[in-house]
Every structure is written in C-alpha cells, then in structure tokens.
Amino acid sequence: MGQAVKIFPSERQQLYDRLADKLETACHLNRKVVSFQANKDEPLYRWFKYKEGFSSSLVKYFLTQYSKRPGKILDPFAGAGSALFAAQELGWKSYGIELLPVGIFAIQTREVLNAIDAEELKKVVKNLWVKLKEIDDYKKHINHIPITQDAFSEETEIALNKHLAYCDKIKNKQIKTVLRFAAFSVLEEISFTRKDGQYLRWDYRSKRKLPGKPFDIGKIHSFEEAMNRKLSQIISDLSPNKTITLFDRFENKGHEQHPVSIMEGSCLEKLPKLKDNFFDFIITSPPYCNRYDYTRTYALELVYLGCDSDHVRNLRQSMLSCTVENKEKTDSLKQFYSSIGRPETFEKVIEVYNNSGAMAEVNAVLDALNKSDKLNNNNIPRMVKNYFLELCFVIYEMARVVKSAGYCVMVNDNVRYGGEEIPVDLILSEFAENFGFKINKIFVLPRGKGNSSQQMGSYGRTEVRKCVYLWQKR
Ligand SMILES: C[S@@+](CC[C@H](N)C(=O)[O-])C[C@H]1O[C@@H](n2cnc3c(N)ncnc32)[C@H](O)[C@@H]1O
C-alpha cells in the first residue's frame, strides 16, 4: 500500500477556514444599495454621478442599525461624500478625507448650498443664456492635457469657456459655485468620451484616430441642453418645499445639522495626524484593487477644475496603489512616519503585513505567474503588494482613531489575477484583527461574484466576493 499524501491547505484556504463563520450572505445589502445606483434618483445626491460611490441608504442603514445616537463619523476615502452627507442628515458630525479635487469640489458645492438663495439662483439661471451670448472676449479657462485633447466639439469648448468666464464675474459665491458645478456635472454627456474604468473611451465622431472597432456613445448633448436639464434638477431639489421635506424629516427627529468637514489630500498622510479615539464610526470604500484609474476616468473633470498634466500625474501617484502605474510608497511612508515622530508605527505596520501568510502566498503566486508570463501586465504583482501594504497603514490608523467599541464598515470587492483569487476581504480583515478590531461580520453581497466558492487559489471561474466588512474596535 502506498503512503497517504498529506495535503497542506494553502495559507488562503486556512484563513478562509478560520474566518468562514464571519461570512454571511446579506440579502438586504444588494448591489443597488451598496453602489451609487440607489442615489440616482435621490435629490442632491443625483446631481453628480460618482459611479464609484456607495448609496446614502447603505450609510443610513449601518448608522441606525449599529449606533444609538449620532456622534462623529469619518470617511478617509470620501469620494463625492455620500457617507458624509447621509450621516449629516442623521445629525452626525461628518469628517472626510479625499485626494481627488473632483470629489472635493462635489462636497464643497453641497456645503455651499446650505446658504444659497434659491430665488436668486432661479433669476440668474433664467438670464444665463442671454448673458453667455453677450460674452465675446473671454480667457480660455480649459487647458487640455494630452488625454483630454479634443474631448469636446469646438462649439461645446467655446460654450464651456464662455460659461467659466461668466462664472468668474459672478459675485455671489454660492451662485457662482452652483453654476460651475452644473457644467462640471455634464462634462461627460457633452463630450466625445465615456468613462470606462481604466481610461476614457472615445467616440468615432471625435477628431482622434482610433484603432479598432468604431465606438458609438450615442447622443452627444449640446451644452445648452445638458445645462438646462441639470439646472432644472438642481433648482427642483433646492425648491423650498423639497428642501424642507429633505431636512424636515431629520429635524423632526431632533437632529442638529453640523457642517461637513473635508480634508484634501492623501489619507496616508492625513489619518496619522488625527487624534486617537476620536470617531464613533468609520464608513468607507477605498479604491478596489482592480486597476481602475480615477485620474484618467475623471480627466475631463480634473482639467475643468484647472489641473495640468503634472498635477494629474502627481495625483495618480498619490492615490492608493490600484493601477499598474503606481510606484511603491514604502520609502516615503517610512520618512513620513519618522518626520511625525512615530517611526515605530511604520515598523509595526510592516511587521503585520509581513506576518500575513495569505498575503505572502498571494505575492509569491503572482510573482510566479508573472515569471511564466501568465499576467497581462508585469506590474500587477507590484500593484497588489502595494495596495495591501498601503491599506495596512490605513487600517492601523483607522483602528487608532476610532473609539473603543466604535465601528468600521468597509465596502470592497475581491479580485482575481491570472486565475488566482485574491481574498481582499479576508486579508484586510486579518490586518484589522492585528490592529485591535474584532471582525463582527463580512457581509457578502448576493449574486455577487462567487459567494458560494469555498476554495482559494485557481479554482475555475466562480465569481469573486463583493463584501461589506463590519469591524468593531475592541
Ligand atoms: C470607491 S471611491 C469612494 C466613493 C465614496 N464612498 C462615495 O460614495 O462617493 C474611492 C475614493 O478614494 C479616493 N482616494 C484614492 N486614494 C486616496 C488617498 N490616498 N487618500 C484619500 N482618498 C483617496 C479616490 O479619489 C476615490 O474618490
């Protein structure tokens, strides 16, 4: 008789087995509730489509389910601010960190609205087209970068520049911001481009010479059409009745409304400067480890806001590593932690990262796949390694700034490269445990990718899990 071969479960499988009882399919958290889709018809939230956002109902669900009273909430990857505003509606004090000027502008605009005179806005909007026609001498406000060049027809480009020139003349800060924001929100629909995750896709009607099959984005709206629609939406959401209904709901419950506080910059540098045990709740969704490039996808909006090529490149490198272009930030993080007098934090985070068996296995497997040319880009191993390393720092800091018994809710998707599943949910939860969080649940979205798969590694094409993690500080 031959000897039985002892099979060692992989590190990922062992981690799965240890955390399996935390995974729970959550029928109440379907894709619509978790993603921006549910915001599409919500007054205020619907103004600017930030596809990467989550819904306000998800935020309200967790805050009301897991907290008895409003406190302080933080979102270190604030995006367009869904978490901050949903929490504000419930009477919370909201704090956000966001790197991209796109989200910052969306958030600042909503803050400005609190003081807007809706009647004055209506008057200005009524006269807008007459005023724009009067402008013949104007400065070119939109200075394209190579990836946005020729995104608009000449007519639209002129209209946009005239609009910005007109906005410059408006004295009333709130009205000026809302008008700038209205045009900002329609840039995609008036352009020859569509957002497509890693880059912008170009329509066959653009001046660009495009390789491959012609791509048709459908109707391209004129500036006037698109602006009229956007401005009526804004005015309708701001009309006194709507505003009263919107905030009344919460005022009736005795909620005070606090201004949202937003910090512009990378959370890798902003979080370490926040106080210990300050927040009651964190709700956040970092970029996913899926090569999605926000700086390319939102290039039109960045250029509209005045960013030049260098600025966009710097933003790309400062973002949490999630594209194959991101370079390692380890040295700069080391220097940063020394500069704030906390070199031991750097060492501790690196130690937790290095001690994760599942992480080491993922890195080793990806390196091996790369060597045998099984990945479609050589930088995927670097991206994955740095994605987790940077999030390890973020999780350390989140655990530090949240109060004891406070919660952290994180929305994120698992990914797969070269056929290998990367259990983002399990690895990040393991880091979280190391920094003092207890893993209450990992809610798995139904019909999400692969919620029934029990195996780790390259096991066919089952879909990967999309999850909402619920961690609580011990
Ligand atoms: C999934 S989106 C969050 C969307 C947000 N939950 C919402 O509802 O609008 C991730 C966000 O993280 C931001 N981000 C990426 N790297 C960052 C960093 N290092 N610091 C702060 N924000 C960052 C991106 O610009 C993006 O807006």
Image: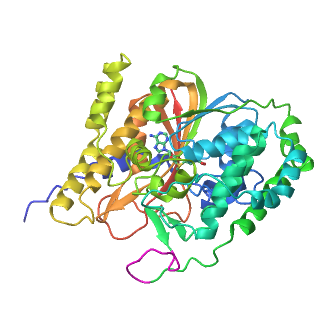
Residue 111 left/right relative to 5: right
Q: Which quarter of the figure is the N terminus placed in?
A: bottom left
Q: Which residues are magenta?
A: 203-213
**Residue at left offset 78%, top offset 44%:** 175
**Residue at left offset 30%, top offset 66%:** 419
Q: Residue furthest right?
A: 241
Q: Residue furthest front?
A: 137
Magenta segment's dominant SS is loop
Residue 245, image x, y percentages: 89, 46
Residue 331, image x, y percentages: 27, 32
Residue 380 can be seen in this image: yes
Q: Residue furthest bottom?
A: 213
Give whichever of 253, 294 is nearer the camera: 294
Residue 115 left/right relative to 77: right
Query: Please, is residue 445 above or below residue 358 in the view?
Result: below
Q: Is residue 212 magenta?
A: yes
Query: Please, is residue 186 above or below residue 14 in the view?
Result: below
**Residue at left offset 40%, top offset 50%:** 424
Residue 205, image x, y percentages: 53, 79
Q: Image quarter for residue 263?
A: top right
Residue 423 left/right relative to 257: left
Residue 467 left/right relative to 165: left
Count of labels in the image: 0
Q: Is residue 167 magenta?
A: no
Query: Please, is residue 268 above or below residue 428 in the view?
Result: above
The colour scheme used here is rainbow
Q: Image quarter for residue 395?
A: top left
Query: Please, is residue 188 above or below residue 286 in the view?
Result: below
Q: Residue furthest left?
A: 1
**Residue at left offset 85%, top offset 56%:** 127
Residue 64 can be seen in this image: no
Residue 439, image x, y percentages: 48, 38
